[in-house]
Amino acid sequence: MKRESQRVITAEHLEQELAMAISQMERDGIFILTDETTRDKCLPKIQTFRVLKNAVVITIPPTDEAKNTESLCSVWKKLSDNGANRHSLMINLGGGMVTDLGGFAASTFKRGINFINIPTTLLAMVDASVGGKTGINFNGLKNEIGVFNDSRFVILDTDFLNTLDSENIRSGYAEMIKHGLISDEKTWAQLMNFDLAKPDFQVLKSMVAESVKVKERIVEEDPLEKGIRKALNLGHTIGHALESFALERYESGATKGKGYKPLMHGYAVAYGIMGELYLSAKKTGFPTDKMHQTVEFIKENYGRFDFSCDDYNTLFELMKHDKKNSNGMINFTLLGGIGDIIINQTATKEEIFEALDFIREG
């Protein structure tokens, strides 16, 4: 699929920026994809915009559990039933689940229609909506089916952050921690000194803009993840395994009533960062003082994830299915220091189990 260049806009006047973006694309029918939460909380902010007067709204269930073939097919059907054609435009209004699934739906309907991402969560602003990764979960695995295809525009309106609860702020902030670790000590230190319990939204807005720039720079250099873009996988090899494990456990009839729930992506990444910084300290010389400072920040703000050593083999098997692997080896991005990125690293089963011990025991 031909990749279009992506333009990221930090909105000052959302209606004007959106109208400008739409004016630069074919728009034989405009469709807005939301989930049930963003339909109620975020859609009212844009639905009265003149440029969206005749737009058709498509709504899917919320949460990552709905990022599946059933939701995808429902979007395709709504597009088809409402006369969408290859010149139509889709606007994805929501968090990472909406931008991932909506981007994949748009990329495959009629062999590809244009789409715009308007992320409404911190996680989507700094990660999911930028960089062209689209897809759905499949067969118990995160983002197993998808394509690389950029939205034509990403429009960031940080006023949407005011609609988020504390858990969603923390979830997105984990990706910002990752961006700090792979960029420079100044950015990392600012992140470590930010009060997540009582966030200053004006300060957070400027930090979001800087975080997005980190990802943009890396994606521009390596759009298809052949090399340095793998830096963005820090925390994700272990994190995706924890996330898939939590979802499987939640959906298992054997664990119903035990208080288990799915693990938000950012929380999984935060725990994954703990484990992969441990591997970095052990294998590639990451400074232990900075590892402990980062780990203490994560423990203070994200708590603990409840799993036991009896779950290690299950988690190891999930890691073996990670898309980043090659030649049967589990692939990690590790650090030699803050901003010192070392891609394509491996670890033994024993070392991975030690990292899981570290996540549990800190």
Image (cartoon, rainbow, N blue to C red):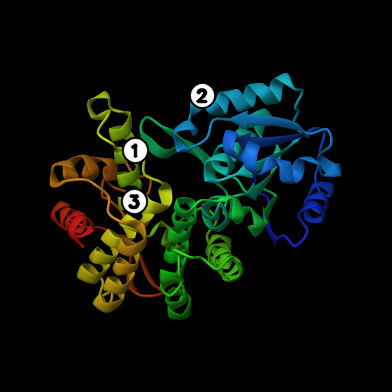
Residue indicated by mark 3: 239
Give amino acid for label 1.
Answer: Lys
Does dot 3 land on a helix, a strand or a loop? helix
Between 144 and 200, the residue placed more toward the observer is: 200
Numbered badge on residue 261: 1
Residue 261's spot in the image, x, y percent?
A: 34, 38
Between discs 3 and 1, the one toward the N terminus: 3
Q: Residue at x 58, y 67 (%)?
A: 213
Between discs 2 and 3, the one toward the N terminus: 2
Numbered badge on residue 70: 2
Residue 80's spot in the image, x, y percent?
A: 70, 22
Q: Eyeballing the image, is 190 above or below 306?
A: below
The outermost residue toward the bottom is 186
Does dot 2 land on a helix, a strand or a loop? helix
Looking at the image, residue 230 sits to the left or right of residue 86; the answer is: left
Residue 103's spot in the image, x, y percent?
A: 60, 40
Q: Give the position of the N terminus as an image quadrant.
A: top right
Between discs 1 and 2, the one toward the N terminus: 2
Between 40 and 268, the residue placed more toward the observer is: 40
Quarter of the image holding residue 31? top right
Q: Residues within 10 Å of mark 3 (few under 14, many from 20)?
A: many
Q: CA distance from mark 1 to mark 2?
A: 21 Å
Between 8 and 265, the residue placed more toward the observer is: 265
Q: Residue at x 13, y 42 (%)?
A: 310
Can residue 107 be seen?
Answer: no
Q: Give the position of the C terminus as an image quadrant.
A: bottom left
Between 1 and 22, the residue placed more toward the observer is: 22
